[in-house]
Image (cartoon, helix red, strand yellow):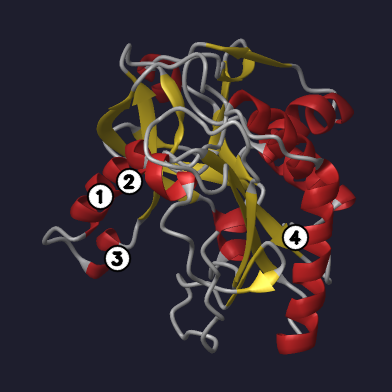
Amino acid sequence: MDSPIKSIANKPDDNLAALSTIDGVEADLLAISDRGNQYGQGLFETMIFSDGMVPLWPQHCARMVADASVLGINLSAQSLDNNLMTFINLLKQRDGQASGIVKIIVTAGSGGRGYASPAEMSPRIICQYFPLPENLEKSRRHGIALFQCQYQLPLNPVLAGIKHLNRLDQVLACAELSKEQSRELSREARANYTDGLMYSRDNLLIETTCANIFIKTAYGWITPQLNQAGVRGVMRGLLLEQLFPECGIKIVEGAITKHQLATAKEIFTCSSIRGVLPVTKIHNLGHWPIGAETKMLQSALNDHYDCYPC
């Protein structure tokens, strides 16, 4: 197996990892034979890191172990725990960091040429640290604006829900968003769109480029059913299984058309990094106030996890 190369010093670019480990060893270069690199055979979790811990780690770990088996990766919760603890200890010792973002990538490990997985493979576990995005609290309090991406998500029921390494759909959608933001508009308008909505090939709303979405219609709350496309986010699961019931608010999973979106009463996106973000504008579709039930769900989330202040 190719040896990892020791990490260089902290990088000034917030989009680059300030610290990385591969299988518990500080490194930032991956073996060229890695099947995650060769074929995208792997998956990842992006998690909020607060007060020296990952508050939603049990949910992230369980999802990663379950989804790894679909991709033919033999992954144990214990190996994930060990790597995360080693990484957090190294992060504290080296930088004294107690808050930010921790990303875990699991690949199938090294393998030879060809799509068929070798009989014996050892998965690689990569941990990375990044600072939190700016203006998170402002976005939670005042809401965000979304752009509608023209690129449509393909349908794939086998991989639907999994946060796998094949993110070309999101790359292409984000390129669209970047192009829109760079047009000859005012400085304020260029910075206006936080994220982009993504629809399926049958024109149903699925998610944004990096978050799940919930809308309140005249008939109640609904979030896209993700059995054909999209990612089942950890924050989405927490909302469905715990926060909506605790608040006494009914929620269903189903198909969402553009007409339903346009006539919605409240809209928010969610992710494990950003928490619950109210949507106040969608390009070429409309404007919305921040709704009472959205605020209630934000408050319920903060009651359980104070790393999501609202």
Question: Which is more foreground, mark 2 or mark 4?
Answer: 2
* Distance CA(mark 3)–CA(mark 2): 24 Å
Along the polypeptide, which appears first: circle 3 or circle 2? Answer: 2
Of residues 74 and 47, the one drawn nearer to the viewer in this rendering: 74
Q: Is residue 281 left or right of residue 291?
A: left
Question: Which is more foreground, mark 1 or mark 4?
Answer: 1
Amino acid tagged 1: Ala
Q: Residue at x 26, y 61 (%)?
A: 190
In the rendering, at what x and y percent does residue 299 appear? 79, 47
Q: Residue at x 83, y 71 (%)?
A: 52
Element class at badge 1: helix
Amino acid tagged 4: Pro
Question: Which is more foreground, mark 4 or mark 3?
Answer: 4
Q: Which mark is residue 284?
A: none
Residue at numbered disc 1: 175
Q: Residue at x 56, y 40 (%)?
A: 269
Amino acid tagged 2: Val
Along the polypeptide, which appears first: circle 2 or circle 4? Answer: 2
Residue at numbered disc 2: 171
Q: Is residue 241 above or below residue 278?
A: above
Residue at numbered disc 3: 188
Which quadrant does the C terminus fall into?
bottom right
